[in-house]
Image (cartoon, rainbow, N blue to C red):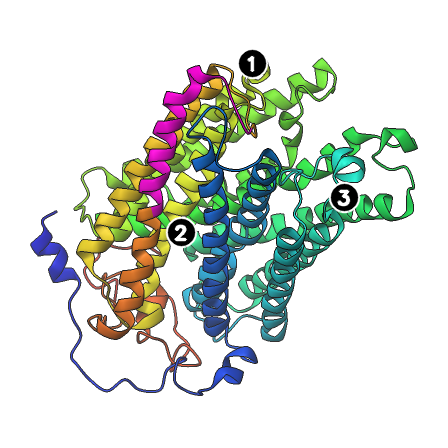
Amino acid sequence: MSTEILESQIAEAPAVVQPETYLNFTSGILSWLLTKDHKRIGILYLVSVTVMFFIGGFAISVARLNLMTPEGSLIPADTYNRLFTLHGVIMVFFFLVPVVPAALGNFVLPLMIGAKDLALPRINLLSWYLYIIGACWTLYAMIAGGIDTGWTFYTPYSSQASHYDIVPTMIGVVIAGFSSLFTGLNFVVTVHWMRAPGLTWFRLPIFVWTLYATSIIFLLAVPVLAMALILVVVERVTHIGIFDPALGGDPLLFQHLFWFYSHPAVYIMILPGMGIVSEIIPCFARKKLYGYTFVAYSSMGIAALAFLVWAHHMFVAGISVYAALVFSSLSFLVAVPSAIKVFNWTATLYKGSISFATPMLFALGFVALFTIGGLTGLFLATLGMDIHVHDTYFVIAHFHFIMVGGMVMAYMGGLHYWWPKMTGRMYSQWWSRMSALIIFFGFFLTFLPQFVLGYNGMPRRYHSYPPEFQVWNVLSTAGASILAVGYVLPLGYLLLSLRYGKRAGPNPWRATGLEWQTPSPPPKDNFEETPIVVRDPYQYHLEKAQNEL
């Protein structure tokens, strides 16, 4: 679709004095710190996770620069170990897991279902405080002393050999886990009890479906991780044998408990991203989402299968061959609901009137990178191949194609899609498109060489390496530098848009969701009157759908 048509879609609203909104109905720092408004809490999360993202990104940037030379002459090995552990812990537990549900989900979920707020607003605020306490506690522990176990905290290393601040770091992660648990509980109750009249289950936007599925995973999986980490703390403090074989414990038990949470956690990260893409693609292809029911069911299918494949991380850990065969087969099954989603997005794009606005560029980037990440996951689900590339850079590349290439691209798409709703302002289309393209190409240059490194046998988490791997490492570091530029750009033009951006109007994308039927930014109680839903979602083929829900 041409740029002219795109610009016509982003019609600037008349310059009128903004009425009272969630941003200005009260003022002062305390009004934000004590707020129970889901929109303000979403903004608090957005700022918090952004800070954590750049801390985690800085840590891995230094570690990657160190890999420019085979000797790793930039930093000592001990510092290198602490940096990649800091990166992993921060990015997984304090960015990837909470960013979409807690930041974007908090802001738009009640708007998307026509509710005034989440069902438990005080619990919502408590969740944010738990996140902040956990984050500050973990950062203090990791910066003051540092840990070198990697984000997996494998025993007996974490329970016996590591000399740094394992216990306070684990306590920080457990505190943040309760934040996710309460958020999941809040979302489940809200979706069940606070939908607008006429908004049946199969009129729910797919993003709501994926947040609901993610919340179920939160409720079932987070307590298991908390229990595993608390048991490690108990073992280190009391010397009771739980995981340490020297004390009569079993280190394999920790891996079972850890991955029972951490593999579903992958879907905690990716499912909301799939939901975002399912909102963006129909909007910017101006078509109804193809196979809505299949996409909704596949979200719940992924959530269910997520709990049945944890041991595919343990093929070389000592589990039996028969158990490995079962988990290998189950891992292949996960590809089915994932493939359904990719097929339906592709079918939605087919013969669509596509506009390449910034959210759409990020969504298309998500589909491309997630597909590559998913296909390489099939290699890791295969027993023989997994043994060959286990704990190599192949695993890192696969994981980052899903989590960073997929999840972060979807998050950026969602952030650009709902930014006008959050702030009432548009951002620079030129700079935002440039950012999407830079991130996409920077990502490829960073992680494609790592597939080659891993296949050729370079193990991950090594401070130095044989010289024959240097070319691929230099390419990867060059890509990471480009990627960093792509991530810093949005920080600039989004902040500038708050002051200089054009007014967005209530529905700049001409989207059909309920959240676009209220002013931008929304008033304190979201809607002047409770909306009544009379249509299925994504009715872009109907001319008046965006006005007559």
Residue under label 1: 388
Q: Amino acid at mark 1?
A: His
Residue under label 2: 411
Q: Alpha-carbon neighbours of circle 1 within 10 Å: few (<14), some, or many (≥20)? A: some
Picture coordinates of residue 499 (x, y %)?
A: 26, 74
Residue 504 on the magenta segment:
no
* First-in-chain label (1 vs 3): 3
Image quadrant where residue 439 sits? top left
Q: Give the extent of the magenta segment.
A: 463-484
Image quadrant where residue 518 sits? bottom left
Nearer the observer: mark 2 or 1; the answer is: 1
Picture coordinates of residue 380 (x, y %)?
A: 53, 22
In the rendered structure, the answer to whether residue 279 lies left or right of residue 403 reads left
Q: Name the residue located 40 percent from the left edge and 35 percent from the top edge.
A: 370
The dot on residue 228 is 3
Total numbered labels placed on residues in the image: 3
Q: Name the residue located 61 percent from the left edge and 53 percent from the top edge.
A: 143
Q: Is label 1 in a helix, a strand or a loop?
A: helix
Residue 466 on the magenta segment:
yes
Q: Is label 2 in a helix, a strand or a loop?
A: helix
Q: Is residue 293 above or below residue 67?
A: below
